[in-house]
Each structure stands twice: as structure tokens, then as C-alpha cells.
Amino acid sequence: LVWRTRASHLMAHALAPTGAVFAALSLITGALWGKPMWGAWWVWDARLTSELILLLLYLGIIALRGAIDDPHRAARATAVCALIGVVNVPIIYFSVVWWNTLHQGATVNLTRASTIAPAMAWALLLCTLALWCHVAAVVLLRARRLVVEEESARGARWAVQWRAA
């Protein structure tokens, strides 16, 4: 909506499936962990509910992109959905501070001493960095594929040759 560039719409289209997969994984693994800890697969906790809303927004972006044939209208509709998602991200993060929930507060903190063991903190940092690198690689590969698909549909010779190779 702001920049109206093809690249921003393309990156949103490339990011949505990856975001949906990770949102779904967090809810599924959270349910697997929550059953023995809380005695329930699901509770209407602030963090869980806001994370479910994020998953639904990702799925909405994917559905809107597939349902609208005009690329400009699809870009505008998915951008509105993405803006709602951007508002939801701080709600997810601060939900344990703003509301009394089942989830504990942050154990890793930049402004005061963390309550996590140093060995675990380093492992967490390494795994987080590796996950971010993986997500970046997957999204960039998907974006490259989307560019080639769009350009070959427009008849660009380089894209048709790239796709054939």
C-alpha cells in the first residue's frame, strides 16, 4: 500500500506460506507441550489466541492472492491483511505482560539480567540464527521462482529459458 512496488508484493507472496507453516508449527508443538503441562490441548490464552489470529491472517493472505485474478487488486487486498498482521505481532509479543496468561514472561532480556542459563542462551541464539538463515533462504528461493513464473507468463525469453533448464 505504501511503496506500491512489485518487489514488496512479491516478497509478501513469498513470505506468507513460510509464515503460515511456522505459525501452525508453533501452535501444534505448543499444544503437544501444553497437554501434559496444563492438562489441555488448547486454552483461550492471550498468546495462543493472538498466535491463532496470526495463522489465520497468513492463510487469508494466501487465499486472497489465489482468489483475486487482478494482480493489482490482489496486491492491495493482501497488503491490508498484512497491515492487520503487523498490528498483531506486538500483541503476540506483549500478551504475557499486558494480560495474566498461562505463559511466563521473557527469560531472555536485553535490558536486565536474563534468567536463562548461559549454555542454554548460547544454544538458543545459535538455533535462532540458523532458523533465520533457513527462512531467508527458503523465502528468497520462493521469490526467485515467483519472478520466473511471472516473467515467463509475460513471455520474457530469459524466464522461459530459465524455466526450461
Image: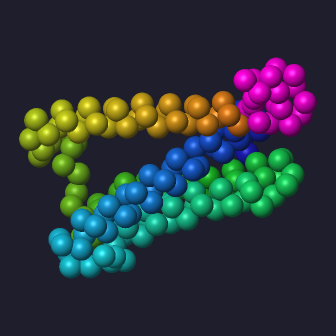
Image position, residue 65 (x, y; %): 73, 54
* Observer able to see residue 101: yes
Image position, residue 123 (x, y; %): 19, 36
Q: How is the image coloured?
A: rainbow
Q: Nearer the viewer, residue 10 or 50?
A: 10
Q: Quadrant of residue 66?
A: bottom right
Q: Quadrant of residue 28?
A: bottom left
Q: Quadrant of residue 31?
A: bottom left
- Magenta stretch encompasses residue 163: yes
Image position, residue 83 (x, y; %): 62, 53
- Magenta stretch encompasses residue 68: no
Q: Nearer the viewer, residue 87 or 33?
A: 33
Q: Nearer the viewer, residue 105 or 16?
A: 16
Residue drawn at the location 10% of the way across and 35% of the way down:
118
Describe residue 16's horizontal placement relative to residue 49 as left or right.
right
Describe residue 75's horizontal placement relative to residue 103 as left or right.
right
Residue drawn at the location 69% of the way across and 61% of the way down:
63
Q: Is residue 24 above or below residue 152?
A: below
Instruction: Write down the region rendered in magenta.
Output: 147-165
- On the rendered image, what quadrant is the C terminus found in? top right
Judged by its main secondary structure, the magenta piece is helix
Image position, residue 95 (x, y; %): 35, 62
Describe residue 124's horizontal placement relative to residue 27 as left or right.
left
* Total residue callouts: 0
Q: Nearer the viewer, residue 28 or 122?
A: 28
